[in-house]
Image (cartoon, rainbow, N blue to C red):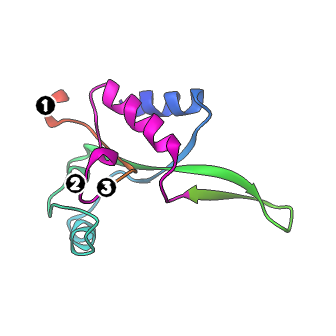
Amino acid sequence: MVGLLLVYASFKGIRVICFTFWRSPGDQRIEFEAGRSRVLFGQHQKWLAIDLAVVDDVDSDLLVDKDEIRWSADPRYQVLGSFWESIGGIWGGRWKDPVDLYHFEVKEGLI
């Protein structure tokens, strides 16, 4: 499913980076205590979730290419999230507390 999402993103011209596949119990506790996760044992610890961020190419004043990560709401997350849901995944952008635009999760029974 992740492969399909990455191919779809490329097809749509959306550059992404993965910043979390697996998360250790200690890292999960940090996310939980910071309010960025609702659970102490999450899907990242089971290898059932990935966090992706949209990236843009930006030219700096020094004429050196650098990447800019879109951490705030961006319509491209909706495009990716809708596709992910269409292939059976759970997208954190639909959650209310906390909203997690970057989170793409596989349903446990699906694999």
Image point 29% across, 59% down: which residue? 23
Locate residue 92 relative to residue 74 in the image: left or right: left
Locate residue 7 relative to residue 60 in the image: left or right: left
The reply to whether dot 2 and dot 1 touch (C-beta < 8 Å) is no
Would you name the residue on which mark 2 appears?
Answer: 45
Give the foreground label among 3 and 1: 3
Image point 27% across, 59% down: which residue? 98
Q: What x and y, as percent, mark residue 97?
A: 23, 59
Q: Secondary structure at mark 1?
A: helix
Q: Secondary structure at mark 2?
A: helix
C-alpha gap between disc 2 and disc 1 = 16 Å
The reply to whether dot 3 and dot 1 touch (C-beta < 8 Å) is no
Quadrant containing the C terminus in the rendered view: top left
Q: Is residue 72 above or below residue 78?
A: below
Instruction: Please tell me the numbered disc located at residue 61.
Output: none
Q: Secondary structure at mark 3?
A: loop
Image point 27% across, 74% down: which residue? 34
User: What's drawn in magenta, residue-wise?
Assistant: 70-98
Give the foreground label among 2 and 1: 1
The reply to whether dot 3 and dot 2 touch (C-beta < 8 Å) is no
Image point 24% across, 65% down: which residue? 28
Query: Which amino acid type is shown beneath numbered disc 3?
Result: Val
Would you name the residue on which mark 1 appears?
Answer: 109
Would you name the residue on which mark 3 appears?
Answer: 99
| The image quarter in which residue 94 lies | top left
Locate residue 87 relative to residue 61 in the image: left or right: left
Query: Which amino acid type is shown beneath numbered disc 2?
Result: Gln
Q: Crowding near pointer 2: few (<14 within 10 Å), some, many (20+)?
A: some
Q: Residue 81 colored magenta?
A: yes
- Mark 2 or mark 1: name the one nearer the start of the chain: 2
